[in-house]
Image (cartoon, rainbow, N blue to C red):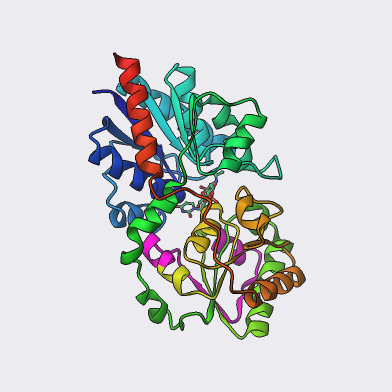
């Protein structure tokens, strides 16, 4: 049986891996080896996802931890190369756009091991943001590219990548549909919130939270939005964001904002289903809010998920309090239309695994 290594390391990758792993097992598709880079390591950033989503224990843990982009990527590159030399897989599967992703694609392609990229073709400005650099490099190193939407496949075509592109849909949409009945709606009440009476916030991008002025403006905007809309604000904060709030001495601006530690997948989705609207700079969560039928105010200069903003469902906002209040108000006051559903039919993982199984069969015959 062919051997495939799945490389994960950060929260959004665990979510994608859960769905692929399920299909690999169901279809007995290949000998599956799981490698965890260790980019996310806190129990609530990593272990909780493995438990909740029944992902198998990693066969290799590389413990790269945090650090500068160069240091993290270099540690992952060196340690993953050693794993590849030991395991000698027929293919490496990488997900999304993190430092783990790009290191995995680079290590494998240098050893002439074919790379498959799940969530290929996402593009956004600014071109120098770390995730964008990771996406472009990974896509150009990958032999098999699995896209979530037509837009992503078109983005690849614009860069001359047309071979090996499979437009299968979004594995995160698959997971959402499959797990929906198990979402933890009870967390809403546990946090003292009432359904449809709160804004759900997630923020972790370096360009928002590592800049004292911008982070201060965003917190100010959220407080004002709370007063204007007469809604509560709940904010499961990424450790990077909590650290910055403290370092910059911005705690005084969080009055009325319920900051809680990061929550697991079932809890975040439970909150998403019950919130009035979402405010986020997460790539994954701006989609998941829409899967839950909610609108998201996306605090980014641009988004890789343009299908959701071009139709006016989600709105981009600048990291300043005035724009956040203006756009938040506009989102809260618009209703009636049905959310867009551009990300496939809930079978993206199955299509991905079937395509790769047949590619691997052809290669090993
Ligand atoms: C990374 C990804 C981003 C993804 C996000 C999901 C890159 C360049 N970015 O961003 O694409 O959307 O994961 O969360 O790879 N930290 C902890 N505990 C942890 C992990 C991190 O305290 O378990 C803190 C550390 O201070 C660390 C900081 O968070 O330096 C940032 O972590 P890092 O993995 O570098 O980037 P993310 O912002 O999580």
Quarter of the figure with the C terminus: top left
- Residue 61 in sight: no
Q: Is residue 11 above or below residue 153?
A: below
Q: Which residues are magenta?
A: 240-269
Residue farthest along the top direction in this orientation: 365
Q: Is residue 279 above or below residue 154?
A: below
Q: Residue at x 67, y 55 (%)?
A: 310
The location of residue 285, given as percent across then percent down, is: 52, 58
Residue 6, image quadrant: top left
Taking depth in this image into account, of 63 and 4 the one nearest to the observer is 4
Asked if the magenta segment contains residue 216, the reply would be no
The location of residue 50, given as percent across then percent down, is: 31, 51
Left or right? Give the position of 267 relative to 339.
Answer: left
Left or right? Give the position of 161 relative to 184.
Answer: right
Left or right? Give the position of 210 relative to 213.
Answer: left
Q: Residue at x 25, y 37 (%)?
A: 27
Count of marks overlaid on the render: 0
Q: Is residue 252 above or below residue 91?
A: below
Asked if the magenta segment contains residue 252, the reply would be yes
Q: Residue at x 59, y 73 (%)?
A: 336
Q: Residue at x 41, y 77 (%)?
A: 188
Residue farthest along the front direction in this orientation: 337
- Residue 282 in sight: yes
The location of residue 126, given as percent across then percent down, is: 71, 45
The location of residue 313, given as percent across then percent down, is: 62, 63
Q: Is residue 164 above or below residue 96?
A: above
Taking depth in this image into account, of 2 and 190 the one nearest to the observer is 2
Taking depth in this image into account, of 302 and 171 the one nearest to the observer is 171
Residue 315, image quadrant: bottom right
């Amino acid at each position: 049986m062919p051997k495939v290594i799945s490389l994960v390391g950060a929260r959004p990758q665990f979510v994608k891996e859960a769905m692929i792993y399920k299909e690999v097992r169901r279809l007995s598709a290949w000998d599956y080896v799981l490698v965890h880079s260790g980019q996310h390591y806190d129990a609530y950033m990593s272990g909780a996802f493995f438990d909740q989503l029944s992902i198998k224990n990693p066969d290799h843990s590389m413990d790269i931890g945090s650090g500068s982009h160069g240091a993290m990527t270099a540690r992952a590159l060196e340690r993953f190369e050693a794993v590849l030399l030991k395991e000698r897989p027929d293919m490496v599967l990488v997900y999304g756009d993190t430092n783990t992703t790009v290191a995995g694609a680079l290590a494998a392609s240098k050893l002439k091991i074919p790379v498959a990229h799940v969530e290929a073709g996402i593009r956004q400005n600014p071109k120098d943001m770390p995730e964008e650099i990771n996406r472009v490099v990974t896509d150009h190193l990958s032999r098999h590219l699995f896209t979530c939407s037509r837009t992503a496949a078109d983005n690849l075509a614009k860069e001359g990548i047309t071979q090996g592109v499979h437009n299968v849909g979004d594995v995160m949409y698959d997971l959402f549909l499959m797990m929906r009945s198990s979402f933890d709606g009870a967390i809403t009440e546990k946090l003292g919130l009432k359904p449809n009476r709160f804004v759900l916030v997630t923020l972790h991008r370096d360009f928002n939270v590592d800049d004292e002025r911008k982070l201060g403006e965003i917190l100010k905007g959220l407080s004002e939005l709370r007063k204007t809309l007469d809604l509560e604000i709940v904010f499961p904060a990424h450790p990077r964001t909590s650290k910055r709030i403290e370092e910059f001495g911005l705690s005084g601006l969080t009055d009325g904002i319920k900051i809680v530690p990061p929550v697991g997948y079932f809890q975040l989705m439970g909150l998403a289903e019950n919130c009035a609207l979402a405010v986020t700079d997460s790539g994954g969560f701006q989609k998941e809010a829409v899967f839950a039928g909610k609108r998201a105010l996306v605090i980014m200069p641009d988004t890789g998920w343009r299908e959701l903003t071009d139709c006016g469902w989600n709105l981009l906002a600048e990291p300043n309090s005035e724009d956040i209040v203006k756009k938040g108000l506009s989102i809260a006051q618009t209703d009636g239309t049905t959310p867009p559903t551009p990300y496939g039919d809930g079978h993206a993982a199955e299509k991905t695994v079937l395509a790769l199984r047949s590619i691997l069969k052809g290669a090993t015959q």
